[in-house]
Amino acid sequence: MEPDTLLADPASVVQRQLDAYNAHDIGALLATYAEDARHFQHPATLLAAGHTELGARFAARFAEPGVHATLLHRAVVGDFVVDHERVARTFPEGKGHIDLVCTYEVRDGKIVDAWFLAGLVQLDR
């Protein structure tokens, strides 16, 4: 694959997004998203649209200490990347994690839409 093609490859785009998320680098994170990208709670509840709303959403998440996503499994089908992630967070009840199934649609090297399906909160003992 040519270097530019590799950068636009859906799995590579989503991996850069995950790396930026774990670095808490909102600028690098937003660079992986189209300007009008949208986040949904699966299946169709809009959570945020556009860089301003996405940036605010990420900033709120990163205000929690210890936020970190671990990739458990990734599947790629055409322009769609489906990740199973375990996200460490600090919930009002304490530290723990939540499993997410994240589906990303990537076009022209940018995430255009993302859907999130959340499991149950698991608190650390």
Image (cartoon, rainbow, N blue to C red):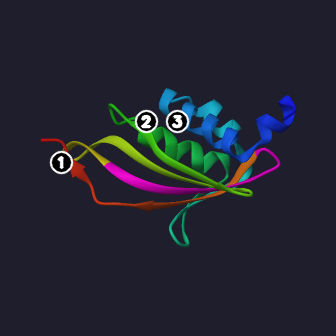
Label 2 vs 3, first from the N-terminus: 3
Residues 9 and 36: in front is 9
Can residue 51 be found in the magenta stretch?
A: no
Against 108, residue 7 (above or below) is: above
> Which residue is at the front of the view, 86 or 29?
86
* Circle 3 residue: 21
* Residue for point 42% across, 42% down: 61
Residue picked out by circle 2: 62
Q: Where does the magenta region start and end?
A: 98-109
Observer-nearest of 26 and 121? 121
Q: Main secondary structure of the magenta part?
A: strand
Q: Position of residue 75 (x, y in %)?
A: 59, 53
Residue for point 32% across, 41% down: 89
5 with respect to 75 (left or right) = right
Residue 46 image position (x, y, % from top left)? 56, 66
First of labels 3, 1 by sequence position: 3
Q: CA distance from mark 1 to mark 2?
A: 17 Å
Task: Examine the rendered structure and indicate whether residue 82 appears above or below residue 90.
Answer: below
Q: Real-space Cα distance between discs 3 and 1? A: 23 Å
Looking at the rendered structure, the kind of residue marked 3 is Tyr
Q: Residue 4 at x, y = what percent? A: 86, 33
The three-letter code of the residue at mark 2 reads Phe
Look at the numbered disc 2 and give the secondary structure of its residue: helix
Q: Residue at label 1? A: 93
- Whole-percent x, y for residue 68 in the image: 40, 35
Q: Residue at x 76, y 43 (%)?
A: 9
